[in-house]
Image (tube, rainbow, N blue to C red):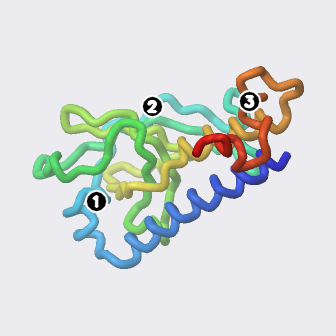
Amino acid sequence: LAYFAHFCSLLHLEYLAELASIRQRRHSAPAKSLQGSGWALLGLPVKAVFGRRDGNQGGRKMLPGWQDVGSEVVAFILPQTLDAERLRFNSGDSVTVSEKNPMADRIGDGIVMGVRAGLLQVQLFGKLPEQKGKTYRLDKAANSVTYERQFTSLLQIAVTSPLPPCCELLVAAKVGGVDDWVD
């Protein structure tokens, strides 16, 4: 339990620090500046929405306290004037989808599925409002995928009994004492 508590605290602190950094960036810079430096994309129209999965169907395991709001894949049309060299969005990155301002009208978070041929596909956790002709804003977000995977692994170590031999090695020494033998 000490192992779980120690690393769970560190994991939460790291994620909170990343969230604070992103929040500071969003507050301190205007939207056009964030777009110019590749941290945001403004005024993106939607080409298609597909692959809708409604929440609470038991298909996805959620972390304690998290709700399954469902998901769908949204294909956004990228501007033709986009400087791809400055774009900070890659496959697997976490993003926040909003109408104009992620701090005021956030729709949901998502994961970039791919960037190609003038399109950016996002798996959105939530549901995009059905309004034709509407444009959206995407902002780079804290890496929720890494956080979720690490937290899930810690939970598995905490509740699995007996532990596999590999995991026994991890928790055999006191927390922080695994590498005491190294000088």
Q: Residue furthest top?
A: 165
Reading the image, the residue beneath label 3 is 169
Q: Residues within 10 Å of mark 2 (few under 14, many from 20)?
A: few
Q: Is residue 59 above or below residue 133?
A: above
Give the residue type at disc 1: Leu
Report, in whole angstroms, how far the alpha carbon at label 2 lies from the one at label 3: 44 Å
Name the foreground residue: 175 vs 55: 175
Q: Earlier in the sequence, mark 2 or mark 3?
A: 2
Q: Earlier in the sequence, mark 2 or mark 1?
A: 1
Q: Residues within 10 Å of mark 1 (few under 14, many from 20)?
A: many
Residue 120 location in percent, x, y?
30, 40
Q: Secondary structure at mark 3?
A: helix
Residue for point 13% across, 51% down? 83
Residue 61 location in percent, x, y?
71, 33
Q: Which disc number belongs to residue 42? A: 1
Residue for point 38% across, 70% down? 25
Q: Quadrant of residue 178?
A: top right
Residue 172 location in percent, x, y?
79, 35
Q: Specify the quadrant that holds the C terminus.
A: top right
Q: Nearer the viewer, mark 2 or mark 3?
A: 3
Report, in whole angstroms, how far the alpha carbon at label 3 lies from the one at label 1: 48 Å
Q: Residues within 10 Å of mark 3 (few under 14, many from 20)?
A: few
Residue for point 38% across, 66% down? 100
Residue for point 41% across, 51% down? 131
Reading the image, the residue beneath label 2 is 50
Q: Secondary structure at mark 2?
A: strand
From the viewer's perspective, is 15 left or right of 177? Answer: left
Give the residue type at disc 2: Phe
Q: Nearer the viewer, mark 2 or mark 1?
A: 1
Report, in whole angstroms, how far the alpha carbon at label 2 lies from the one at label 1: 22 Å
